Amino acid sequence: MSAESGYVFGLMKTITIRQPDDWHLHLRDGTVLKAVAPFTAHFGRAIIMPNLVPPVVTTADAAAYRERILAALPEGSSFKPLMTLYLTEASSADDIAAGFRDGLVTAVKLYPAGATTNSHGGVRDIEKVMPILERMAEIGMTLCVHGEVTDPEVDIFDREAVFIERVLAPLRKRIPELRIVMEHVTTSDGVDFVRAQNGAIAGSITPHHLIINRNAILVGGIRPHYYCLPVAKREKHRLALRAAATSGEGTFFLGTDSAPHVDPLKECACGCAGVFNAPNTVACLAEVFEQENALDRLEAFASLNGPAFYRLPVNEKRITLVRHDVPVEALPSKILAGEDEITIFDPMFPIHWSVEESN
Ligand SMILES: NC(=O)N[C@@H](CC(=O)O)C(=O)O
Ligand SMILES: [Zn+2]
Ligand SMILES: [Zn+2]
């Protein structure tokens, strides 16, 4: 483990780790993109979700979106967006393979149609995309999956577990070479499934699913800023996620799923799903790993396991996290995107960590 830590003057604890990456991020487009991009610019790289309206389906769409992202970054940022394509039943295997070969596209994203925000153009019948998935397995390209069934008969809290049984396990059997990331794992079923695949399938975990359980959405009133998909589950699932994230096991890594929606779209009769956590992700993670006595494994989760799965080099830059005895001043609770506000994830515990970039 290369993370270094120490006490300075007996007062301040610091930990230096390789610069983290975010393996699941929504940057959106237009005004929101400009507002949120600076909050991720201290990451090395991020897997950029393609669920725009209209979605990023072709390599040409991804190239154009990548330019818009680069233009929204603060000057001097070395952040590298890793682009994904939104899989549809009409997607072209040749286009996908060409994008991957040229280094323009890193992964393909499977949204079951109707499972989450802007997923209506996703896949209804997985049989129809089998030739594409087979081609991806051949060329070693990763499939990122939103792992929930959309069957209205299935209880929303069971949709991840049922997806594993109905879709993921059969897919794994059918194309064992396909590299799959089960994104935003929210249940112990997901954790167990990923573990049982011996490295062929990875699981990304969000900071908020390590911090809240389903009570956060409902206790004392409806709290739309804790509503996301897959929806937070029971406490036992949160504990399983914490154990997985802090285990150091190579198959679990950070995917923030930072998913900004302007407040009017969250605070209404049918609010959008998504938590905006980019501004405090690293500080929240430090807090969680400290609570679990696992600060020495934060680097594996945030900076090492992701690149290893994606077969990419680790970042050379380092960041230093500083622990303060007194909680650091809370962030503003919202950021501005044009005329609208976007609420930042509130972990409901004081934060003692701040992030300092090193070199
Ligand atoms: N996670 C969410 O609740 N929302 C995401 C979509 C997704 O990742 O499922 C979004 O795009 O808003
Ligand atoms: Zn999702
Ligand atoms: Zn997402």
Image (cartoon, grey):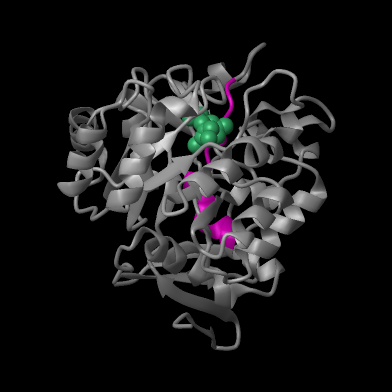
Residue sitting nearer the eye, 208 or 175: 175
Left or right, 155 with respect to 133, comes to: right
Q: Residue furthest right?
A: 220
View extreme (top): residue = 269
Percent of width and height locating residue 38: 34, 44
Closer to us: 123 or 258: 123
The reply to whether residue 334 is in sight is no
**Residue at (39% x, 66% y) in the render:** 308
Task: In the displayed orientation, state which residue is furthest to the left.
Answer: 102
Across and down, in percent, residue 199 comes to 51, 63
Does residue 54 appear anywhere in the picture? yes
In this image, 45 relative to 325: left or right? left
Q: Quadrant of residue 268?
A: top right
| Above or below, 77 relative to 1 | above
Residue 202 drawn above or below residue 214: below
Q: Could you say which is closer to the camera, residue 55 or residue 342?
A: 55
Magenta segment boundaries in residue numbering: 272-285
Q: Which residue is drawn at 72% across and 46% down?
A: 212
Whether 282 is among the magenta residues is yes
In x, y percent, where is residue 328?
A: 59, 59
Q: Which residue is drawn at 38% across and 22% down?
A: 89
118 inside magenta stretch: no
